Image (tube, helix red, strand yellow):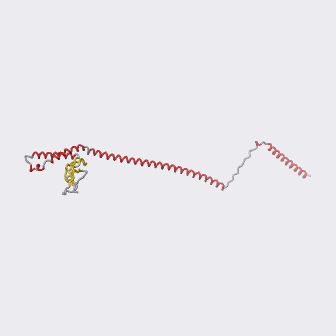
Amino acid sequence: MLRQSISATSRALRSTARLGTQRQSALRLTQSFQTPIAATRPIALRTRWYSSEAGTAKKDGEASASNGDKTNAAEEAKKEGEGESLEALKKQLEQKEAEVRDLKDRFLRSVADFRNLQDRTQREMKAARDFAIQQFAKDLVESVDNFDRALSMVPPEKIKPEQADESNKDLVSLYEGLKMTESILMQTLKKHGLERFDPQGEVFNPNEHEATFMTAMQDQENNTIMHVQQKGFKLNGRILRPAKVGVVKNK
């Protein structure tokens, strides 16, 4: 009887405990429904990450390809820029070289013109010095010709020493005086470049001689001067007056 009553009491206590537990659960559930939504605690969302070697390699490859494309594009743009700048520099260099060639050509021409001017000026100055007395010399040769004519009018036999006597002594003295004066005059003229030449027996030269007549002479060579009517004069090597001569013409 005692065991039965203890067992009954135990069952009763367990039932009461279960009932209490159920009431507390119901109360908690009721309170949870009565709690406002704003008072509820936020639910933390968790992001799940999935790692994959193939995906990582793919992303790395795409990133590398993208970076490589950008690098290639930058290099190509840089090369194009360098190429354009190089072409511009080449054009500028060609222009400068053309300018240098033009300036060099002008410089050389100027130097050549200046040297030609110097040479021409020197020649003109020398000619002016050498032929400054040309007109005076032309007028003077007439006087020299008169000396020559006066001396040629005296017969050679009358001025020979063995023929000299009281009758022609004065004539010989006059002749010798004229001859000496002529010699001094010719020496003075020669110092200033004026020379007299006698082409007797020379070959006829039209640049130095003036043929007044021609005649055939079998005992002399053709085209030689056999008679001198008037002697010629040169001034510093230039013909001042050609000699007037007679020329042999056998053909």
The quarter holding residue 128 reads: top left
Residue 29 placement (x, y as % from top left)? 81, 45
Q: Which of 131 and 68 lies nearest the eye of the viewer?
A: 131
Q: Percent from the top left, x then y, of residue 63?
A: 62, 52
Apparent side of residue 210 relative to residue 63 in the rendered image (left or right) = left
Furthest-right residue in view? 1
Q: Foreground residue, 38 or 12?
A: 38
Nearer to us in this view, 43 or 97: 97
> How many marks overall?
0
Give the residue at the far left of this rendering: 166
Where in the figure is residue 69, as x and y percent of width and height?
59, 52
Quarter of the image that includes the C terminus: bottom left
Residue 4's spot in the image, x, y percent?
A: 90, 52
Could you say which is closer to the camera, residue 26 or residue 61? Answer: 61
